Image (tube, rainbow, N blue to C red):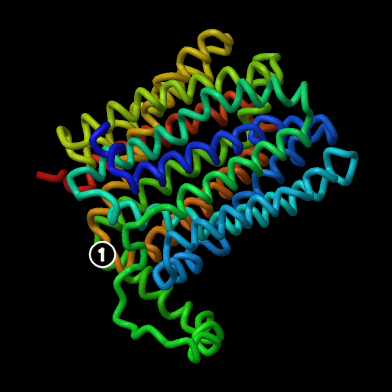
Amino acid sequence: MLAVLRQRDFSLLWFGGVLSVVGDFFLFIALPFFVYERTGSALATGAMFAAETLPRLLFGSVAGVFVDRWDRKKTMVVADLSRAAILLPLLAVAAGGPVWLVYVVAFVEATVSMFFLPAKDALVPNLVAERHLAPANSLNSMGEQIPSLVGPLLGGALFGLVGLGGLVFLDIATYLVSAVLISLISTRSIAPTDQPAGDATETAHLAASAWAGALGEWLEGLRLVGRDLRVAAVFAVVAVAMVGEGVITVLIVVFVKDVLGGGSPEFSWIITAYGAGGIVGGFLAAWLGPTLGEARLLALSAAANGVFLLLMFNIPVLPVVVALGVPAGATVVGWFVGAQTLLQKWVPDSYRGRVFGAYETTQALLLLVGMGLAAVLATPLGVVVVLSVVGALYILAGAVAWVVIPAER
């Protein structure tokens, strides 16, 4: 893994991502409790998560089309700068403004992120050799988990010290630094294409026709998913797991508050435990990926994650829940890295943006399904029962992955 991190362009991408995720975690801790305290409604809190997820459903696949057309590095830089500006209305909310601005900001920021995320996933195979993809994806996953060790604890403490406004300024700063680091990447970041590049006089025409051709290219990317049964199987397994993720996203706050009797500090401890597990899982995935093969890594990690979730939600004792959060976080990284690496290996570079865009859309659709199920089922069945079903879904996803995804040799 250190050999991968020593590669200049990948390290610039990685460190930029770590910084921006740290800032995001500040708000990840603050905003749900801010909305819940202002409204007293679990539905209003769930609506915030839905506002962040809906753009993945609406724009994920279409954004992937443009990622395959545009310079991927420039796309990420513009996305970072745009997200920094988009956060500014939250300052009005912090000053007593209407809560509905939170939903608008969450929606617009997530929409811009739909261009950043597939660009990043599509660019990684251009920055490292194929044999280094699993370690690189493990590092990327750890880059999201490491901030969860710092972000929640700092976010919970800083929320009380500087309030929502101070956290917004910190998040803006991390986006700006990320944009600077990514702009320094020197590796070619434009996908190979059969389309001739237009000169300056054709720029306006190409811009106008871009959306017109997006539907056809989007469908072409989806057809690739359907033609390659290996890719389709990865999509299907991840889809099952994402239903569970949607349920957890909505009900974890309710579980902490109503079942454990905690608040934002206790919530931050659990997220921190997930982050610690994610770091461990990153090292394990980098080691086990080449040893077991990414297909087996995906299957075993998903099933193990389900087991740990079942234990967490059925032993409602805070120290136990926090302790189990470590292996739960580790196994999440395992199945994520397995799926990510398989797609990067099997999808041609010229289609990678579209396939990862469709991947985002698939995840978003099933996240929303999970969120809807959480809202509908939590009251009649109880939070613990619904979250236990989530654990069973992960075990099912692991079993399906073991059967249908061919093990690499």
Between 166 and 295, the one lying in front of the other is 166
Q: How dense is the environment of label 1, judged by Cα within 10 Å: few (below 14), some, or many (20 and up)?
A: some
Q: Position of residue 343 (x, y in %)?
A: 29, 53
Q: Quadrant of the C terminus?
A: top left
Residue 238 lies left or right of residue 251; in this view the side is left
The residue under the point 60% across, 50% down is 53
Direction left: furthest residue: 409
Q: Position of residue 241 (x, y in %)?
A: 43, 41
Q: Is residue 4 above or below residue 210?
A: above
Q: Position of residue 323 (x, y in %)?
A: 47, 12
- The amino acid sitting under disc 1 is Pro
Between 6 and 402, the one lying in front of the other is 6
Residue 235 lies left or right of residue 319; in this view the side is left
Q: Quadrant of the N terminus?
A: top left
Residue receiving disc 1: 348
Asked which secondary structure carries label 1, the reply is: loop
The residue under the point 51% across, 30% down is 147
Q: Is residue 359 above or below residue 279?
A: below
